[in-house]
Amino acid sequence: MLKVENLHVKVADKGILRGVSFELGGGELHVVMGPNGSGKSTLALTIAGHPKYEVVKGRILFEGADITHTKPEDRAKKGIFLSFQHPVEVEGVKVIQFFQRMLKNLRGIDEVEAYDMIFRAVEELGFDSSMLSRELNVGFSGGERKKLEMLQAYLVKPKLLILDEPDSGVDVDSLKVIAGIIAKLHREGTSILLITHYGRILEYLNPQRVHIIKDGRLVVSGGMELVKLIEEKGFAAVKDNDRADK
Ligand code: ADP
Ligand code: MG
Ligand code: MG
């Protein structure tokens, strides 16, 4: 599904990623962890094709095709969806309108059908439908924004969902709801790359693999034992024994 090969990425002329390699199979859930500033969001944005992030070495393959230099909107059409760490406020655009446009653009679904689909999704996820008539993200709390992002992902039904810290700044109850939606998408066959700072959300999930990024390098990949190690001893305990830039 997704293959990242020896990725080196520059942002604003500064080298950020310096060797990231991993392979995520169809329907798998992988976790990316690492200290602040290690390059996790850079990895997410690079896979999604953000124009500021320049691949200087290595490549990204999606379903066998080289997408290293493909435009972000074309990646989205191929089924790659990135949920943002800090979603923007858009005044004057209601949530429902935003989702209707999104479904039209990404899935070619007309407004009327999209309308029903959106209300059905809100019901399935147990959300309050009044959120749909509010302006996009304006005045939304951290937890509400995260829920909105999950609703968005649930509607898009991407092949590959990249989540950048969906658990940051949310309370325990919202965390459970968010984890529940991620688990549901995973069960339905969506491939997921989940970036997280803390192990907590993983109590509700069943990841196939965990990758640790330190200082722009993927230093080790393994199972849940890595999460346990980090929780007990911090990122310093993770040794650079699987350098991906060799
Ligand atoms: P993480 O998500 O792991 O906290 P980031 O990928 O956000 O880390 O950032 C990694 C490094 O790259 C940081 O030093 C950050 O300041 C830098 N960086 C990221 N994006 C930009 C940008 N758009 N312009 C300048 N520096 C950036
Ligand atoms: Mg960060
Ligand atoms: Mg980040």
Image: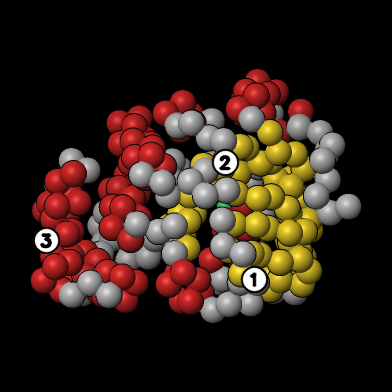
Where in the figure is residue 106, as x and y percent of width and height?
34, 72
Q: Where is residue 83, by image quadrant?
A: bottom left
What secondary structure is found at the residue carrying circle 1?
strand
- Residue at point 71% right, 71% down? 55
From the viewer's side, name the closer residue of 190 and 56.
Answer: 190
- Residue at point 50% right, 71% down? 75
- Residue at point 31% right, 70% down? 107
From the viewer's side, name the closer residue of 31 and 149.
Answer: 31
Asked whether disc 2 touches disc 3, contact meaning CB atoms under 8 Å apart, the reply is no
What secondary structure is found at the residue carrying circle 2?
strand
Asked whether disc 2 touches disc 1, contact meaning CB atoms under 8 Å apart, the reply is no
What amino acid is at disc 2?
Val
Asked whether disc 1 touches disc 3, contact meaning CB atoms under 8 Å apart, the reply is no
Height in image: 242 above or below 116? above
Height in image: 225 above or below 188? above
Say which mark, if any, is on residue 189.
Answer: none
Where in the figure is residue 231, as x and y percent of width and height?
62, 25
State the residue position of label 1.
Answer: 66
State the residue position of label 2.
Answer: 31
Height in image: 43 above or below 49? above
- Residue at point 84% right, 54% down? 245
Q: Where is residue 187, by image quadrant?
A: top left
Instruction: Judge from the rendering whether residue 41 lies leftward or rightward of residue 218; answer left or right.
Output: left
Upstream in sequence: badge 1 or badge 3: 1
Say which mark, if any, is on residue 116.
Answer: 3
Render colour scheme: secondary structure
What amino acid is at disc 1?
Asp
- Mark 1 and mark 3: span between their CA atoms? 36 Å
Q: Residues within 10 Å of mark 1 (few under 14, many from 20)?
A: few
Instruction: Judge from the rendering whether residue 215 lies leftward or rightward of residue 85; answer left or right.
Output: right
Which tag is nearer the camera, tag 2 or tag 3? 3
